[in-house]
């Protein structure tokens, strides 16, 4: 049996007529950039997450950059980010002109360790950017408590957490701004690049809208120097169709996670395998199903040989990336993040995964480990 890590084709086949129809509308109207389909999606997504505004962009990385700039964070400012995330979390802070300051991961939730934030705050710190890593909300109450006391903004990286809940609230709509990616493999994925900023602040939304389109609200009149970060019409149309399925797809992911936990429970209690834990404040939507194990590389190879594709998220922590060598970090600075980088393994996870496939994956892991 072959179990792919993700399979985007099965999903497309299931909703093909709706997707093809939506794409055809864009082609018929030649509304290739922004336009009606993008506007309709922005409205629907704002309502979905519970924010007043949504501004569609051409990537999640652009969303992070523009959210920073629109919130007034830039040159000379520091932004606290987790060392354990996809590189773009820090990258978007850097391209906005600010400096990412790294914090270690929590050993249980994998997200930023809120207890370690305060020690990194300086007079230059302007914002905290929690990442709802792998689809589970970060510890927002602790983060907001620090932010309120130290007068900092909270800007969420929700690129892996479309529909994920923190104490019943959709993430992304909790902070000053929330950043989403619609990269095809995300829980809500476009058929190309895409991203969005959501916010309740009309002025932040206006600035993001301005910056995504050459600093221009009116054609050929440019108020500021901006960017070309616009969302394409086809992506807006695709996302509008797919948004209607998101809750159902997230429920399926949750059911698959529960099934993995059931089948792998025995190996986990033997102490060699650590399963993801849903935190009491969170409703996890399992963008990734990440386990931890000693001898990760050998297990990954054995699974690969058995036809089970897995991933590592992420093998090199951000503070050890060559791109941030000038920050002067070295191995040992963030021990929990570094430990996880050597032990994490992401198992196949997508809504259309079958029970036979999950059973097969669990069987192969059990065989390797017991
Ligand atoms: C995917 C991702 C991004 C970047 O999104 P792109 O659309 O690929 O630019 C940012 N942060 C996190 C945590 C992500 O997973």
Image (spheres, helix red, strand yellow):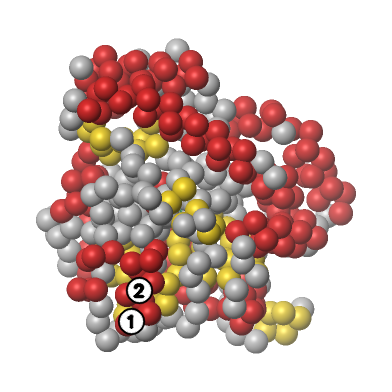
- From what the image shows, is residue 36 above or below residue 347? below
Label 1 CB sits under 8 Å from any ligand 1 atom: no
Residue at figure coordinates x 28%, y 64% from the top left: 114
Taking the image as shown, residue 336 lies to the left or right of residue 310, namely left
Query: In which quarter of the view is residue 148 placed?
Result: bottom left
Taking the image as shown, residue 182 lies to the left or right of residue 41, namely left
Instruction: Where is residue 181? Give x, y as percent.
Output: 53, 55
| Dot 2: element | helix
Query: In which quarter of the view is residue 319 placed?
Result: bottom left
Q: Are marks 1 and 2 in contact (CB under 8 Å)?
A: yes
Of all residues, the one furthest to the left in this rendering is 332
Instruction: Where is residue 250? Give x, y as percent.
Output: 55, 40
| Dot 1: element | helix
Residue at figure coordinates x 25%, y 28% from the top left: 268
Q: How many marks?
A: 2
Q: Which residue is mark 1?
A: 149
Instruction: Where is residue 355? Give x, y as percent.
Output: 50, 19
- From what the image shows, is residue 59 above or below residue 76? above
Query: In the depicted view, which residue is nearer to us: 68 or 26?
Result: 68
Q: Which residue is mark 2?
A: 145
Residue 94 showing in the rendered view: no
Assign the N terminus to one quadrant of the image: top left
- From what the image shows, is residue 151 above or below residue 45? below
Instruction: Where is residue 159? Give x, y as percent.
Output: 49, 55
- Separation of marks 1 and 2 at Cα, in angstroms: 6 Å
Query: In which quarter of the view is residue 106 placed?
Result: bottom left
Query: In the depicted view, which residue is nearer to us: 54 or 139?
Result: 139
Q: Could you classify mark 2 by the number of other residues whose Cα lies within 10 Å: few (under 14), some (14-19), or many (20 or more)?
A: few
Taking the image as shown, residue 68 lies to the left or right of residue 121, namely right
Residue at figure coordinates x 30%, y 50% from the top left: 110
């Amino acid at each position: 049996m072959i179990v792919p890590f993700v399979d985007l084709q099965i999903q497309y086949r299931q909703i093909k007529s709706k997707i093809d129809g939506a794409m055809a509308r864009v082609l018929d109207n030649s509304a290739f950039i922004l336009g009606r389909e993008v506007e309709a999606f922005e409205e629907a997504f704002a309502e979905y997450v519970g924010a007043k505004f949504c501004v569609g962009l051409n990537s999640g990385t652009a969303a992070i950059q523009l959210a920073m700039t629109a919130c007034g964070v830039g040159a000379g400012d520091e932004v606290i980010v987790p060392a354990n995330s996809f590189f773009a979390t820090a990258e978007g802070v850097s391209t906005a002109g600010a400096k990412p300051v790294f914090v270690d991961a929590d050993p249980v939730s994998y997200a930023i360790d809120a207890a370690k934030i305060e020690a990194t705050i300086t007079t230059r710190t302007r914002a905290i950017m929690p990442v709802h890593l792998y689809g589970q909300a970060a510890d927002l109450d602790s983060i907001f408590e620090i932010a309120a006391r130290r007068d900092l903004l909270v800007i969420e990286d929700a690129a892996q957490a479309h529909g994920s809940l923190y104490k019943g609230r959709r993430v992304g709509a909790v902070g000053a701004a929330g950043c989403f990616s619609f990269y095809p493999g995300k829980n809500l994925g476009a058929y190309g690049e895409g991203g969005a900023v959501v916010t309740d602040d009309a002025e932040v939304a206006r600035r993001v809208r301005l910056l995504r389109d050459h600093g221009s609200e009116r054609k050929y009149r440019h108020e500021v120097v901006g960017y070309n970060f616009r969302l394409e019409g086809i992506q807006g149309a695709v996302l509008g169709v797919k948004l209607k399925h998101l809750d159902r797809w997230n429920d399926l992911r949750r059911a698959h996670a529960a099934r993995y936990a059931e089948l792998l429970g025995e190996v986990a209690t033997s102490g060699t395998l650590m399963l993801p834990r849903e935190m009491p404040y969170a409703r996890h939507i399992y963008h990734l199903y990440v386990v931890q194990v000693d001898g990760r590389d050998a297990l990954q190879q054995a699974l690969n040989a058995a036809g089970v594709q897995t991933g590592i998220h992420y093998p090199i922590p951000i503070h050890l990336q060559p791109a941030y060598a000038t920050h002067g970090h070295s191995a040992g600075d963030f021990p929990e993040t570094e430990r996880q980088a050597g032990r994490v393994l992401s198992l196949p996870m997508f809504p259309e995964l079958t029970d036979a496939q999950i059973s097969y994956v669990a069987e192969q892991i059990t065989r390797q480990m017991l």
